[in-house]
Image (cartoon, helix red, strand yellow):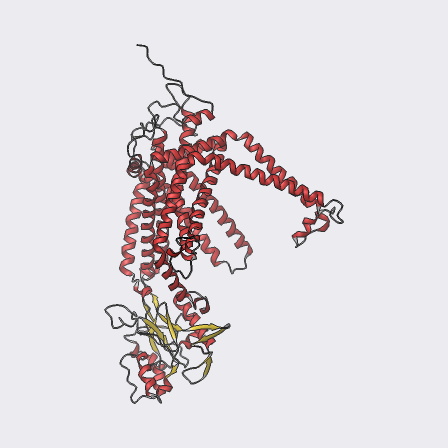
Amino acid sequence: MGNTEEENYYGKHGEPRKFDPKFKGPIGNRHCTDILCCIIFVIVIIGYIALGIVAWIHGDPRKIVYPTDSYGQFCGQKGTPNENKTYLMYFNILRCASPVVLINLQCPTTQLCVSKCPDTFATYRETRSNKSYWDYYKQFCKPGFDRVGKSVAEVLSNEDCPSMLIPSRPFLQRCFPDFSTRNGVLMVANKTMFKDGDDQMRNVTDLREAANHVRVIQHGTKSGINNVLDARSVGMKIFEDFASSWYWILIALFIAMVVSLLFLILLRFTAGVFFWIFIIGVIGVVGYGIWRCFYEYYSLKGVPGANLTIYDIGLQTDFRVYLELQQTWLVFMIILCIVEVIIILMLIFLRNRIRIAIALLKEGSRAIGYVMSSLFYPIITFLLIAICISYWAVTAVFMATSGEAVYKVMGNKTFCNYTGSTCIPETFNTTNIIKTCPGTKCTFAFYGGESFYYQYILIFQLSNLFVFLWLVNFSIALGQCTIAGAFASYYWAFKKPADIPACPLFSSFGRAIRYHTGSLALGSLILALVQFIRIVLEYLDHKLKAAQNSFAKFLLCCLKCCFWCLEKFIKFINRNAYIMIAIYGKNFCTSARDAFFLLMRNIVRVAVLDKVTDFLLFLGKLLVAGSVGVLAFFFFSRRIPGISSEAPNLNYYWVPLLTVIVGSYLIAHGFFSVYAMCVDTLFLCFLEDLERHDGSAEKPFYMNKSLMKILNKHNTPVPVPVQ
């Protein structure tokens, strides 16, 4: 490999070495970096695609979309006999109430696909004496069933027909009892009691327990049926609200985009005003606090018991007791005085650094004005992340549904040793189980298997998650490196905008993809490893919540805290490493080292700029989301005179309101993330400028005049040759 233009600029420990007069911005003559990691990254992507193909071959999402009956057939699937039978009905849902159901994960009753759910109470015994009942009842029996010559006991024993019908409504394509509450009393079809298949009177609370067990089997959750009584109606109302207000939501989000853009453009004029208003406000609030504490302290003079100390009264649950002591207000006043002095001293000693931070913020706003295309680059990052999320989700679903149908023996009311054991439907009638346990059936239980692929499905799912994290972080890294290269081109243009290269964003993107895929992959790999460990720790914490081992909980909490801090630190290092990669074209480790030492030599400036930037951007996000949210609130609640009639009729006006607020915040975050990267890039370039140049004709400063004025520096005029 040939040497880069900046090979000798830094020493072994990151100290600046020598000036390179040829340097005029992002290096053009660069080479590929971290090639080994690039090769590994490409191989992993190919393997990830292969994993997805294998998952798609073995998986079957219909197992999630469609419920499965006792014969392993999907309900509602097109091109099958059950095409028009979209709902799954339980012949005797009361049998699902047994605790054994939660152990075997199988409800011991026939499950059949039906075209509609029952809407009335009825029992099979009642149909023997009422022909009109039978005309309605028979549609819920097994296809082709003929009851001629069969007794009631025989029909119910073979479960050819349900022993009873319960008024039901579809929920997740399954027929659940139509629960409702009246004055706190649980009912089904306005009844609290009903007759079961044995003509015994039962309470509807028995149905609730059975329905809860079914939810555990199907979805692995123990949430009560009461939590989903109105889920369907609420969901429909929310959908109606979105359908009637979607265009107004889009208009509000467009307004949020315009406000975000205006805020960034106007920051060159308002950054200093916002910051100093905030600082003066903080000083004023703390000053008022000091006065208030002194006033309370002076008012309690001579009050009986007010001269007691905090130590004298000990620990009290009522905090108001402490507010009646002079010592409490004296402590508050001393603390606030210390805070006030610290703030004032920081403003005195850090005033130049604060001015530099504000000047860089203004310069960032000016830079965005020249590289407007950068504001829309987050759309590319969003699309890349959306592709990663979609691929990960689809692959995870296919892998989760890759098992084969598992059938188990379902016993009747008599005890059978074979109940719950696996069976094969095609050969079940030829086994000894039928002879030993008459009336048992081989019915579908769940999807699983013992194949090699299914045995390692957990490892494949974890691999899917890890590569997903790696790809998402790589997409973000690519965006950061691209934006950094574009704004570095702006900073190192001596005459702005004349010296700014054409299409700086596109050129930076090309350099990042062509030369630095390996470096970006390495940085994102390190971050993905830490995030993966954090997810594992969160999973372990969730599993150990019910544990009584205090030491394990404490250790897990410490590990979570440490890895959270480590993730933040790596993100900080990666971000600045990508900036150095975009400028100098070095590998990841060298760029991370150079950026780290450069920042450590200017740690106070880093801290001040970071906090000032965070404050202004947070203020901007609140301003955008708050202003658009308030406007949306007054519009959707019909409180704006003149256009109140234009507002759509809504069931819940908070549905579009929350959508607008969250969407506005995300839009502002997208715009401001570009601005934050811009400021960070300009800051590193500024520090490089200070260490490289001295203002002479041979080594002029590239910073703007306001920064040179703050630092009391200037460029030496180039002498004009005498004619």
Left or right position of 128 against 209: left
Estimate the x, y position of residue 573 in percent, counting from the top left: 42, 38
Front-most of residues 127 and 113: 127
Q: Position of residue 411 (x, y in %)?
A: 38, 78
Vertical comparison of 323 with 222: above or below:
above
Residue 395 drawn at (x, y percent): 32, 56
Which residue appears at 46% of the width and 69% of the height?
226
Residue that lies at the very extreme toward the left in this rendered image: 79
Closest to the observer, 303 or 126: 303
User: Which image quadrant for residue 491?
Assistant: top left
**Residue 574 shows in this picture:** no
Q: Residue furthest front?
A: 642
Residue 241 in sight: yes
Quadrant for the C terminus in the image: top left
- Rendered residue at 31%/82% (across/down): 138
Q: Nearer the viewer, residue 597 or 282?
A: 282
Tell me how many marks there are.
0
Residue 486 sits in which quadrant? top left
9 to the left or right of 556: left
**Compared with residue 430, is residue 721 higher up or lower down, i.e. above or below?**
above
The image shows residue 558 at horizontal and vertical percentages of: 52, 49
Q: Quadrant of the N terminus?
A: top left
Is 709 located above or below residue 638 in the figure? above
